[in-house]
Image (cartoon, helix red, strand yellow):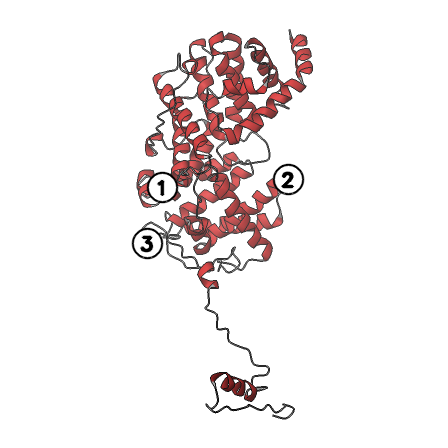
């Protein structure tokens, strides 16, 4: 007690009070706990916010479907198959949370809980998927930051992924969920790097794996999220080849819209099967326009993805992707189906460094539109105008395809359309998603107006 001053308590007639006893105890303990850590009396709450349980559907024993319980705080507290440095952790974080918004746009879909998804669980449980995802995430960041070439980090992870996938495919888990997921990511990696031939090899192997599992319909029942990933890959690659491996009947969806009435100009001569798909595409566009309004209930993310995949399959089955046609009797159907495919690509994630990741669709659409423009009647001019705009804001860059601007200018002059609000009013009679198409559509229109003299000069030289 050396150095501690004495303190006197004035005791009253009723003895020492509670407050006086507190003063005495405090004075006696001065210096007793110096240097000792004090245990907090607050209730612990931090762990409640960072502990997330990954609960996945699907039968046990299928690789990445096993349950894991990581601590989650932006991947920093998570246990990965291999230790990650801070840069790799950021890559993983950016890939998962950016791609979830690309696949399931928040203006249309309810929030997709990536932490509880099968994909995060695969990263945590399977080393092959872990490395392939890191290779994809590094490529994804390089692409959006416009970095040239493939980084050494990307090459390291993709080589590790290939070695681990080969081991998995030669073992007892050759058709497990984790094996299927890993092969899907290898194909996606090739898509990002515009290696479609290699991607098709992976897709062919993936198809055989799924068949050995009992087929895509069975996989849809066992693990819907994984099956949809395989179907999305198939339908995206089918836009390169014209021939999907699966068919539309495995993803049936019913699209209803009480208030949508298809414009008469849109379906005067379309075949019945195509007419039904066009109506469903238009109804889906209207549904998305309604969901972007504040306060509206959003779509389930997997239902959103299922609808897009189903519509793509049905259009590919009727569109002339594989074999071009030039007969006047089918040009209307061909332009409509190909332009609808281009429309749906605006709802797909972006791969590669060029605007058009779908050269087959681009070539077919360009030749079909040119043939249609040369022969179409006045009543079909609005379909032509919509097709030109959708093509210009989706799969073709007007800077490299001046004919798009020329044709838009010609059709607008023929229809007496001289300002953007009037043009937009006509485009809205066809499938059009406001948040995705309004701004690029207006930019395209302004580009037409700014370059009208150049377009007219070129047109005069050609004639």
Chain-order first, disc 3 or disc 1? 3
Q: Cβ–Cβ below 8 Å for labels 2 and 1?
A: no
Dot 1 crowding, Cα within 10 Å, few <14, some 14–19, many 20+: many
Q: Give me the residue at 32% from left, 44% from top.
A: 213
Q: Note whether residue 316 is visible.
A: no
Q: Answer with mark 3 or mark 2, whichever residue precedes in sequence.
A: 3
| Image depth: mark 3 or mark 1 in front | 3
Q: Are marks 3 and 1 in contact (CB under 8 Å)?
A: no
Q: CA distance from mark 3 to mark 2?
A: 42 Å
| Helix, strand or loop for disc 1 | helix
What number is the disc on residue 171?
A: none
Residue closest to the eye, 333 or 453: 453
Residue 60's disc is 3
Nearer-the-camera pick, 120 or 24: 24
Q: Position of residue 375 (x, y in %)?
A: 50, 8
Using a 10 Å C-alpha cutoff, classify the residue at mark 2 as few (fewer than 14 neighbours), some (14 to 19) or many (20 or more): few
Picture residue at 45% right of the left edge, 47% below the top:
182
328 displayed left or right of 403? left
| Residue 337 x %, y % | 44, 21
79 relative to 271, above or below? below
SS type, badge 2: loop
Q: Which residue is mark 1?
A: 210
Which residue is under mark 2? Answer: 146
**In terms of depth relative to the viewer, which is nearer, 219 or 92?**
92
Quadrant of the image occupied by residue 4: bottom right
Q: Please say if 85 is above or below 444.
A: below
């Amino acid at each position: 007690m050396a150095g501690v001053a004495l303190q006197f308590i004035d005791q009253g007639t009723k003895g020492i009070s509670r407050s006086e006893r507190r003063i005495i105890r405090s004075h006696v303990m001065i210096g007793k706990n110096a240097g000792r850590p004090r245990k907090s009396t607050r209730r612990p709450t931090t762990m409640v916010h960072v502990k997330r349980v990954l609960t996945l559907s699907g039968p046990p024993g299928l690789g990445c479907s096993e349950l894991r319980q990581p601590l989650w705080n932006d991947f920093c507290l998570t246990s990965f198959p291999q230790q990650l440095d801070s840069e790799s952790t950021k890559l993983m974080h950016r890939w998962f949370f950016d791609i979830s918004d690309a696949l399931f746009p928040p203006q249309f879909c309810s929030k997709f809980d990536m932490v509880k998804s099968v994909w995060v669980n695969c990263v945590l449980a399977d080393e092959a998927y872990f490395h392939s995802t890191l290779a994809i995430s590094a490529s994804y960041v390089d692409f959006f930051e416009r970095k040239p070439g493939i980084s050494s980090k990307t090459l390291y992870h993709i080589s590790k992924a290939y070695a681990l996938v080969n081991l998995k495919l030669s073992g007892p888990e050759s058709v497990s969920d984790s094996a299927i997921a890993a092969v899907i990511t290898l194909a996606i990696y090739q898509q990002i790097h515009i290696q479609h031939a290699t991607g098709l090899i992976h897709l062919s192997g993936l198809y055989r794996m799924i068949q050995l599992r009992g087929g895509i319909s069975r996989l849809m029942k066992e693990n819907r999220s994984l099956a949809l990933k395989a179907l999305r890959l198939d339908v995206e690659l089918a836009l390169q080849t014209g021939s999907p491996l699966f068919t539309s009947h495995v993803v049936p969806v019913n699209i209803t819209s009480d208030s949508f009435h298809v414009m008469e100009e849109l379906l005067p001569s379309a075949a019945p099967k195509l007419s039904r798909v066009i109506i469903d595409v238009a109804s889906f566009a209207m549904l998305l326009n309604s969901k972007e309004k504040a306060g509206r209930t959003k779509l389930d993310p997997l239902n959103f993805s299922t609808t897009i995949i189903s519509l793509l399959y049905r259009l590919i089955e009727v569109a002339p992707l594989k074999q071009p046609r030039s007969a006047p009797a089918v040009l209307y159907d061909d332009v409509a189906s190909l332009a609808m495919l281009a429309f749906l690509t605006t709802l797909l994630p972006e791969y590669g460094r060029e605007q058009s990741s779908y050269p087959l669709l681009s070539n077919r659409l360009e030749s079909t539109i040119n043939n249609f423009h040369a022969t179409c009647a006045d009543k079909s001019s609005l379909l032509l105008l919509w097709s030109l705009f959708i093509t210009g804001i989706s799969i073709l860059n007007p800077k490299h395809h001046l004919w798009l601007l020329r044709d838009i200018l010609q059709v607008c002059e023929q229809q007496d359309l001289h300002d953007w609000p009037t043009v937009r009013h006509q485009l809205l009679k066809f499938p059009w998603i406001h948040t995705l198409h309004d701004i690029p559509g207006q930019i395209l229109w302004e580009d037409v107006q700014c370059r009208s003299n150049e377009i007219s000069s070129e047109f005069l030289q050609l004639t």
